[in-house]
């Protein structure tokens, strides 16, 4: 889900959004012993605008299917990756804590939506002994609206693992 060699590695969607990217490339590449380093068969544009991580993953899945059909029909020759390599590191659950200091409303919205998918710990904030987990965010009329699930801190830490 990156324009390799930029973005090789883990948590590509989250790493792109947290860096402020609004679009990316879906890349079909040959697997090699080095992660995401193989030659590229094709790239297709993918918007990161609009929707939660789950919705972006659905769009990416549909685009991937179109790319598979094109790969089978066109049999393109892979091209060696060129350019500066940028590695992404897989995010940890602790990195899902909402760092509210010095954040704009748009970056709060993006932070919540980039983690709003099955398999990722939701954006959260711990206040006192409570853990607030955010999902279904929307940015409208100068505020971020989101669903909030509140639990006692530490009791549901494995709910999204």
Image: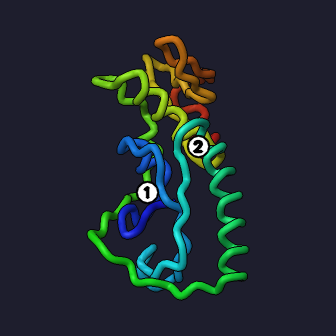
Residue at 41% of width from left, 68% of height from top?
4
- Where residue 97 appears, x then y in whole percent? 43, 33
- Where residue 88 appears, x then y in whole percent? 37, 59
| SS class, disc 2 | helix
How many C-alpha atoms fall within 10 Å of the one at disc 1: few (<14), some, or many (≥20)? Answer: few
Above or below: residue 24 compared with residue 143: below
Residue at 42% of width from left, 49% of height from top?
16
How many C-alpha atoms fall within 10 Å of the one at disc 2: few (<14), some, or many (≥20)? Answer: many
Closest to the observer, 67 or 161: 67
Residue at 52% of width from left, 25% of height from top?
131
**Farthest residue toward the front?**
74
Tell me: 100 left or right of 152.
Answer: left
In this view, the mark in front (1 or 2): 2
| SS class, disc 1 | loop
Closest to the observer, 125 or 86: 86
Above or below: residue 55 compared with residue 12: above
Q: Is residue 42 visible?
A: yes
Residue 70 figure quarter: bottom right
Above or below: residue 76 compared with residue 12: below
Closest to the observer, 72 or 135: 72
- The residue identified by callout 1 is 90
- The residue identified by callout 2 is 53
Q: Is residue 11 visible?
A: no
> Which numbered tag is attached to residue 157?
none
Residue 61 figure quarter: bottom right
- Where residue 52 appears, x then y in whole percent? 60, 38
Residue at 56% of width from left, 73% of height from top?
28
């Amino acid at each position: 889900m990156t324009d390799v060699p930029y973005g090789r590695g883990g948590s590509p969607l989250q790493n792109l959004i947290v860096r402020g990217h609004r679009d990316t490339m879906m890349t079909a590449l040959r697997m090699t012993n080095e992660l995401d380093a193989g030659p590229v068969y094709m790239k297709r544009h993918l918007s990161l605008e609009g929707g939660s991580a789950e919705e972006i993953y659905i769009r990416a899945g549909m685009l991937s299917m179109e790319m598979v059909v094109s790969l089978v029909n066109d049999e393109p020759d892979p091209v060696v990756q060129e350019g500066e390599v940028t590695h992404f590191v897989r995010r940890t659950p602790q990195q899902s804590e909402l760092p509210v200091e010095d954040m704009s409303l748009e970056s709060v919205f993006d932070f919540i939506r980039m983690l709003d998918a099955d398999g990722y710990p939701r954006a959260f904030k711990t206040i006192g002994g409570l853990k607030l987990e955010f999902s279904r965010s929307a940015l409208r009329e100068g505020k971020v609206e989101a669903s909030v699930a509140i639990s006692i801190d530490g009791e549901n830490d494995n709910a999204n693992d």
